[in-house]
């Protein structure tokens, strides 16, 4: 079986842009993945060139009931603890999102048969708040081909990981109470809501996508499931403080 192709040159350019904190200005037609499998292959090539491992997944959907799901590998070297300082020059024009992430309590190994929703949802072990720093490598974003954005790790920059607590199935995942400030200003545009609805529905997709690409989903992987607060474009240095009521608060300083 042939593996999906990916444009190796654009993987090199993306990794160079990540390292240098620069934006890619030219988008040639051959930089755009031919299809979704090629875009996911591009993600894997980016991590290979960065010489890092998979620290987790970001996954999301823009439809609350059964809509298409997409995801991206999260480089392990881009995970930071709550309270960390990160440099804005590493993530040009950083955008902030407040999300809920999960860890599973068992390992899912590659196999031909898909894992059931019950297998995955019955294995949620813990949950916590995270802040994602979004920073595309393309100056034209968001006006770029969706497959190119998918290949570019869905515009992922870094993940700030808060303390996790044991999973509570009764938690109000659809409409939790959230607060999010940046530089002491409220940046939540209204009531918190996830475009996917209940974010737990995204977890079986991650497990099956990852295992069917020959990789195991282990309990240390972080699976973050989409913003409850929209996308906030920062306008300078500051401290972001977020809380999803019922979970430990989280913070990051952009310097």
Image (spheres, grey):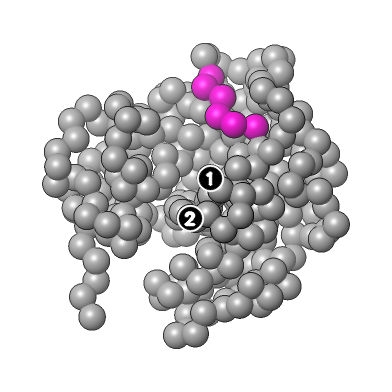
Which region of the structure is painted magenta?
229-234
Rendered image quadrant of residue 116? bottom right
Whether residue 233 is in magenta: the answer is yes
What residue do we see at 71% from left, 44% from top?
A: 129
Which residue is under mark 2? 68
Q: Quadrant of the N terminus?
A: bottom left
Q: Is residue 79 visible?
A: no
N-terminal label among 2 and 1: 1
In the rendered image of this protein, does residue 124 appear above or below residue 16?
below
What residue do we see at 49% from left, 85% from top?
A: 113
What residue do we see at 56% from left, 48% from top?
A: 63
Q: Which secondary structure, mark 1? A: loop
In the rendered image of this protein, does residue 143 appear above or below residue 54?
above
Q: Is residue 133 visible?
A: yes
Whether residue 137 is in magenta: the answer is no
Cα distance in 3D space between marks 2 and 1? 8 Å
Instruction: Give the residue furthest to the bottom.
Output: 112
Q: Nearer the viewer, residue 174 or 203?
A: 174
Relative to 66, is 32 on the left or the right? left
**Residue 218, position in %: x, y?**
59, 70
Which residue is under mark 1? 62
């Amino acid at each position: 079986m042939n593996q999906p192709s990916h444009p190796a040159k654009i993987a090199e350019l993306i990794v160079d842009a990540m390292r240098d904190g620069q934006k890619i200005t030219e988008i040639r037609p051959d930089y755009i993945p031919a299809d979704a499998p090629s875009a996911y292959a591009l993600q894997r090539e980016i991590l290979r060139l960065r010489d890092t491992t998979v620290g987790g997944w970001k996954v999301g959907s823009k439809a609350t009931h059964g809509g298409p799901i997409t995801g991206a590998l999260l480089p392990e070297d881009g995970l930071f603890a709550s309270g960390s300082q990160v440099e804005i020059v590493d993530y040009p024009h950083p955008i902030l999102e407040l999300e809920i992430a999960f860890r599973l309590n068992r390992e899912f190994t590659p196999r031909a048969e898909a894992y059931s929703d019950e297998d995955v949802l019955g294995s949620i072990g813990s949950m916590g708040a995270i802040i994602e720093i979004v920073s595309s490598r393309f100056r034209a974003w968001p006006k770029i081909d969706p497959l190119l954005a998918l290949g570019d790790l869905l515009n992922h920059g870094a993940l700030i990981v808060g303390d996790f607590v044991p999973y509570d199935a009764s938690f109000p995942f659809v409409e939790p109470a959230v607060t999010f400030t940046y530089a002491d200003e409220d940046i939540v545009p209204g009531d918190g809501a996830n475009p996917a609805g209940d974010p737990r529905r995204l977890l079986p997709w991650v497990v099956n996508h990852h295992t069917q690409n020959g990789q195991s989903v282990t309990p240390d992987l972080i699976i973050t499931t989409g913003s409850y607060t929209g996308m906030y474009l920062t306008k300078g240095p500051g401290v972001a403080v977020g809380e999803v009521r019922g979970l430990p608060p989280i913070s990051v300083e952009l310097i």
